[in-house]
Amino acid sequence: MAPLEVRAFAPGRVNLIGEHTDYNNGLALAFAIAEGVRVRAQATDERRIRTSALDLDEHDELALHDLLRPATATSPDLPNPNLPPGDGWRAFVRGVAAELLRVGVEIPGTELEIHGNLPLGAGLSSSAALEVALCLALLGVAGAELDRRELARLCSRVENEWLGAHTGLLDQLASLYGEADTALQIDFSNLDIQPVPLVLADGWRLATLDSGDPRTLAASGYNKRREECARACELLGVQSLREAREDSLQQLPPVLARRVRHVLGENARVLATVADLRRGALEEVGALLDASHASLRDLYECSTPAVEVAVRALKETGALGARLVGGGFGGHVLGLFPPGVSPPAHAREVRPSRGAHLLA
């Protein structure tokens, strides 16, 4: 019998290095952080989902039968096109519930309470944390389980089909598989995940700084960058940019060649960072962060003036390296600080922490 009440937590994430590689079947090195989203789910006798976003003092309500249109002899259940989609956090609740129903999870009537301590639109993946926490809570009251890689795919469909942000799987996998003092090397060609030690001891620190430039993936250049990568694949005759070769890029328009060069270089920087971390050479990682940012700025062109100011602020404070994190076009920047050097007072220190889980 399913429990009457479940509490779930899902963390945000910081991508140490490997940006815009996930949807190109590349490599990334990410970690879950301590901050995230909590969801309390209470089963009820009604066939409705009632939700309270406690931080916003906002509420939503919908009938479960409205989430899916009736099945026919020729088509499976699909999201009801007549259902008002909602906006902001409401779209996530609708999307997660509908996608769980779509894969056969029998969700009972449920009251949900959402609370989080992640800044929105900052590049720390508040959206993935919300999706994952909602999934775990609703699965809990349904007495059901799903493989965590399948959960990541389900949450990505919510982003793609319900929010219009064509994201990859990086954020969801980092939130689901995170471990303390550990980064995750993710190979998006086969979803292989390898733990890499990321122990911040002896005064080493990682900190993020808000650029003050809010980021909305669906409305930014993020989707356009995905389209450019897809077009480059088409022109090169490859399935993904993981297969692209530097000596073939002269056949591409210059803007597409720049996008491909970033992805190829970023994959190499991930492998170099992993090697440095495995031998405990944190001091070598700073230059790789700087190189990643230069590539994101000059080749992928997803920085902004406010982001550049934030990067300079971290460097001037003493960071060994700094770069934008997340999809870019605003949000936070990440800096690596050596022993004896403190981040700016208004920066947020981050540490590799445990991934998504149910709370006692």
Image: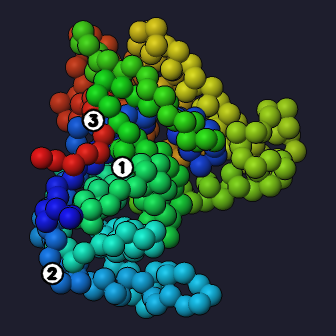
Q: In which quarter of the image is residue 97?
A: bottom left
Looking at the picture, tell me which residue is in the foreground, 166 or 328.
166
Say which element carries label 3.
Answer: loop
Q: Where is residue 186 in the image (x, y as percent from the top left)?
A: 52, 35
Say which element carries label 1.
Answer: loop
Amino acid marked by disc 1:
Ser
Kindly report the distance in space between the C-alpha atoms of the residues bearing marks 3 and 1: 15 Å
Kindly report the distance in space between the C-alpha atoms of the residues bearing marks 1 and 2: 33 Å
Q: Where is residue 130 in the image (x, y as percent from the top left)?
A: 30, 57
Looking at the picture, tell me which residue is in the foreground, 28 or 294.
28
Residue at (67%, 44%) from the top-left corner? 259
> Which mark, residue 2?
none
**Residue identified by numbered label 3:** 354
Residue 297 in view here: no
**Residue identified by numbered label 2:** 45
Residue 335 relative to residue 188: left or right: left
Front position among marks 2 and 3: 2
Front position among marks 1 and 2: 2
- Up the image or down, 143 lies above or below 292; here it is below
**Residue identified by numbered label 1:** 125
Residue at (41%, 13%) from the top-left corner? 282
Residue 167 relative to residue 99: left or right: right
